[in-house]
Amino acid sequence: ESSYRLEWMDEPWDDVALAGGWLLDLERQIAPDLVHLNGYVHAALPWHAPTLVVGHSCVLSWWEAVHGEPAPAWWKRYRDAVTQGLQQADMVLAPTAAMLTDLERLYGPFARTAVVPNGRAASAFPPHAKEPFVLAAGRLWDEAKNVAALDAVAERLPWPVFVAGANQHPDGGTATAANVRMLGSLAPDALAQWMGRAAMYALPARYEPFGLSVLEAALARCALVLGDIASLRELWHDAALFVPPNDHAALHAALTRLMHDEQQRTTLAAHARARAVQFTPERMAAEYLAAYKSLVKPVRSRAHDVWD
């Protein structure tokens, strides 16, 4: 494990170069069959093994979603370095087709692509007796998660809204909330307990390449109210209510509607769980292994004279 600054951080490039040398030295020591990267820039290094890059998010698509305009000129070096890395990768994966589409639009074309959804074990998020409150999980200061929209409407809702997540910005400063009840950062088991009890889970996100917290809440049989963005539509199209992220009136109406309609709330929650149990860790692992096998050259076994 290293402590180098990552490519999306402020002034990262000296550390990015040092990290590249460190990674190539690891490859010389380990001689892997495949290099799996969760960042972009280092895919342009002179690897000996084939490279697979997974796009979990990116600065340019985040900026567009949050600010409604292309990223400013000071991100050009990032754009150029990410483009070079992704175009030199042997395969580019993403957890949703929406994320992959953004990557191809901003940095493509790529040699090969695939979509592999994330997974969660249903046993870790058991439903409990549901209670009349709304839960959300996300950093209060994160404009992409848009938890501030919930704070804006919570005072006029008949049920309380609880938010799990940090309110301390990593660059300093504290985000405040007037109307939601902050739970702070919760351990995974504690958050799973809250999800199990919550009748509804709300995330009016502006940007969410996959949304693990939504998957976890769906496994816990919460009724979902989500931001109307391509990735969340792709995953939960008939198992959630969707609202435009910047439309507070629509968010208030959707939440109020479900609070007063137990039948619809229960039906949506059941649909969400039925969809969620399809996103298993076993499925995710099998699809990653299939991608790995498509890149790794077969090796003849000396002992059995078969292809492994």
Image (cartoon, grey):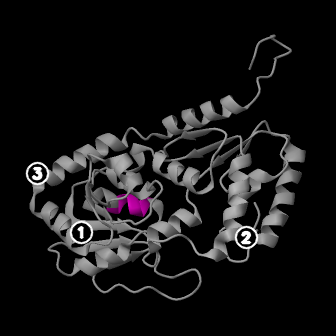
Q: Is residue 219 visible?
A: no
Compute the Cα span from label 1 to label 3.
Answer: 19 Å
For the magenta stretch, what is the residue range?
189-194
Kind of residue indicated by mark 1: Leu
- Measured as percent of width and height from the top left, residue 5 is found at 73, 70
Kind of residue indicated by mark 3: Gln
**Crowdedness near tag 1: few (<14), some (14–19) or many (≥20) residues, C-alpha within 10 Å:** many
**Residue that mark 1 sits on:** 251
Front label number (3 vs 2): 2
Q: Is residue 163 visible?
A: yes
The single residue placed furthest to the top in the displayed view is 305
- Which element type, helix, strand or loop, lies under badge 2? loop
**Residue that mark 2 sits on:** 5
Of the two numbered discs 3 and 2 on the same chain, state the one appearing first in sequence.
2
Compute the Cα span from label 3 to label 2.
Answer: 49 Å
Q: Residue at x 34, y 67 (%)?
A: 136
Q: Foreground: 205 or 219?
A: 205
Q: Residue at x 30, y 47 (%)?
A: 237
- Measured as percent of width and height from the top left, residue 268 is found at 21, 49
Q: Foreground: 279 or 86?
A: 86
Q: Is residue 34 left or right of residue 153?
A: right
**Residue that mark 3 sits on:** 263
Magenta segment: does it hold 192? yes
Of the two numbered discs 1 and 2 on the same chain, state the one appearing first in sequence.
2
- Which element type, helix, strand or loop, lies under badge 1? helix
**Crowdedness near tag 2: few (<14), some (14–19) or many (≥20) residues, C-alpha within 10 Å:** some
Please identify the quadrant where the C terminus is shown: top right
Circles 1, 3 touching at the beta carbon (< 8 Å): no
Front label number (1 vs 3): 1
Compute the Cα span from label 1 to label 2.
Answer: 37 Å
Position of 135 relative to 265 (above/below):
below
Position of 194 relative to 25 (above/below):
below
